[in-house]
Amino acid sequence: MLLEPTSQVTLPHETALPQENPLIWPLLSLLKSTNQHWKIHSLAAELSQQGLLHELDSDPQKNLFKHNFLIMNALFEIQTLLLPDNWLTIQSMDIYLTAQIPSNLPIALAQTANLRDYYYDWNNYDTCANVVRQMLESFWNKYQNYMGFDQQPLEKIAALAVLELPSNANARDIRKQWRKLALQWHPDRQGGNAARFRQVCEAWQSLR
């Protein structure tokens, strides 16, 4: 059942994640660097090949579900991050990025609202918060190695300076600003800069 559209564009609420989902950034790279339509299983295969997606459950069916959950969560995060400049179509068998925004964006968002809410809720991952936190921490470590991050954590003041934040910035301000700068400097975006992207990611890792 679709939600009633509103007269204004209402973006999805921010996800209350136990950690930032690191699959957001490699998935954004894939979507930006290839002009093609993807399926969930093909995205999973590509991430696995890059060493960013490993076995999450000894049960093959649960392992598949958890892979899909993480990818779908990241895709909906990307969809929100890219608005209003780009539109990410998210269907299990057809995932693609386009600069053409739907003519009625509120309706387009409403059509996937229930699905988005499901994948934003980590209770549906079928594990406890500590396990999710440890899993995402492991993913971040793999992604840091993949991107060639400096493993030495920054001091708080230095990390805040990288994120262009004052010393009294709260956790919400930090997360919001890091996402803004990471998206701005992502190397697969026009005007992006891989070195600056690494810097803001390192700052985020030091502060979170």
Image (spheres, helix red, strand yellow):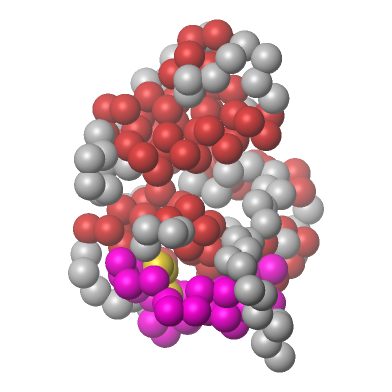
Relative vertical location of residue 141 with respect to residue 88 in this rendering, above or below: above
What span is colored magenta in the figure?
Answer: 90-117
Residue 102 seen in the figure: yes
Mark count: 0
Q: Is residue 102 magenta?
A: yes
Q: Tell me, yes or no, whether the highlighted magenta stretch contains residue 105.
A: yes
> Whole-percent x and y of residue 124?
73, 67
Q: Compare residues 151 and 193 and report the one nearer the observer.
A: 193
Q: Find residue 10 and report its image quarter.
A: bottom right
Residue 112 vertical position relative to residue 189 in the rendered view, above or below: below
Asked whether residue 27 appears in the rendered view, the answer is no
Q: Residue furthest bottom?
A: 1
198 left or right, relative to 23:
left
Residue at 71% in and 91% down = 1
Task: Assign the C terminus to one quadrant of the image.
Answer: top right
Query: What's the residue at 22%, 47% (across, down)?
Result: 190
Q: Position of residue 143 (x, y in %)?
A: 41, 41
Q: Which quadrant would residue 111 be assigned to in this image?
A: bottom right
* Residue 163: % across, % down: 48, 23
Q: Position of residue 89 (x, y in %)?
A: 42, 75
Q: Choose top left, top right, bottom left or bottom right for residue 109.
A: bottom right
Q: Residue drawn at (37%, 51%), measured in percent from left and top?
A: 26
Q: Is residue 134 above or below residue 87?
A: above
Residue drawn at (27%, 58%), measured in percent from left and top? 32
Q: Nearer the viewer, residue 170 or 137?
A: 170
